[in-house]
Amino acid sequence: MIHSLLSPVKILPMAETDSAALADMLLFLTGISDRPVRVAVVRDTWPMSARDEFVTALGTTGAEVFEFTDVQPNPRAADIDRMAASAELGRCDVVIGIGGGSALDSAKALAMLAKNGGSLGDYLGSEATRKISQKGLPLVLVPTTAGTGSEVTKVGVYTADSGRKYTLGSPFLLADAAILCGRLTASMPPGLTAATGFDALDHAFESLWNKNATAITKAAARSAAVAVLRTLDGAYDASLRSDNPFPGDAEIRQQMLEASCMAGIAFGITGTAAGHALSFVLSEEWHVPHGAACAFTIEDIYSFALGDPANVYELALVARLFFPDESGELELCGRLLGKIRDMKKRMKLPTTFTELGAAVAAGDIPRYFDRAFTDPKMLNQLPPASPEVLYPYLEAKT
């Protein structure tokens, strides 16, 4: 219900790749019935049989498929510009992005550039020389990781030639449809399952402790947080035994993917907050994958957020579903924090700079992280964050 209220993206759960359903979708999006639909498929090159089967199924619909594979983690503007300059993209009727957040964000940029022109760098940062003025090519996004929520958001995150990461946002970047097929996440290794799952949890939390939150986005964020906390342990266990799956593993992957989507809907409206502002520095300086970067500070921002009574109330509502025997709001929040810490430990997510592979001393924190406090995402945080209150958390990780 909340999906249909909050997201203009048509969300299509799909247990298996269905060629007939894909053909119907292409006809609906393009209106083309007198010739083959030309489809630009944007994907990475990570070996994944289920994704390759999906692309093959597209071909069986009669579509003419062109693959664009110049996709890197934290997608680079230069790579996207090379793909956008392809004559094949100019012939395409629809763009389908399939993969993790980097592939989906790359697909958003290609669909946009096909109609708006220019290079991606023209649209990035405070000194951008162009604005997105119109909808791009019809766009379908198919996540193969459960965490980014990119399939339902109006933003993409891109690395400029300078090495800085920028968020590009516009309603014109929204997909027309998102296909949620849990089977496509089956090849995620345990580390990626954990990192992307914590990215989804961070999206939900940052939508709660956010100045742009409303009653309905809070409801979506709480639902997403509960769903992630209920399913991530099972999804992680399923990834450990992917060669010998248990009955129910496919179902829990589907549930995890839908939880990530719900979190994406929530933060797609509110924006993210302090945790994501800090995570950009981790990715820029030490190339930490996005999910692991978000997980790195999640318990610290959680602890800081408890300084706002409104956040205590919202987080206690989430916690009460896991600890029904507890009555005090602060006690409930404390027990939920313990659960999050236990999950991070079990899933072997980094908790210190050394574990990240970054040589950082306490005195280095301002030099690296001062720029996070000029990031607009930081301004969404409630209560308002400052270096004085957040740096001690980072210094404790050195």
Image: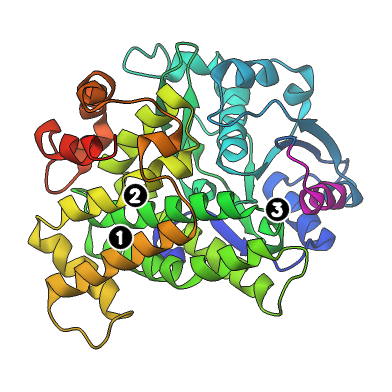
Tag 2 and tag 1, C-beta contact below 8 Å: yes
Return the residue nearer the eye: 96 or 368.
Answer: 368
Q: Which residues are magenta?
A: 46-57
User: Residue 246, labelled with which disc?
Assistant: none
Q: Which residue is label 1 attached to?
A: 217
The earlier-in-sequence mark between 3 and 1 is 3
Residue 93 visible in this rendered orientation of the protein: yes
Instruction: Provide the secondary structure element on which disc 1 rests.
Output: helix
306 relative position to 192: left or right: left
Q: Which residue is label 3 attached to?
A: 28
In the displayed structure, 329 sits above or below 32; it is below
Q: Quadrant of residue 2?
A: bottom left
In which quadrant is the C terminus drawn? top left
What amino acid is labelled 3 in the image? Phe
Q: Which residue is label 2 attached to?
A: 269
In the displayed structure, 219 sits above or below 190; it is below
Q: Residue at x 67, y 61 (%)?
A: 181
Instruction: Provide the secondary structure element on which disc 2 rests.
Output: helix
115 relative position to 22: left or right: left
What amino acid is labelled 2 in the image? Ile
The picture places residue 235, in percent across and down from the top left corner, at 58, 66
What amino acid is labelled 1 in the image? Thr
Q: Residue at x 8, y 62 (%)?
A: 309
Label 3 to label 1: alpha-carbon separation = 30 Å
The chief SS type of the magenta part is helix
Tag 3 and tag 2, C-beta contact below 8 Å: no
Q: Quadrant of residue 137?
A: top right
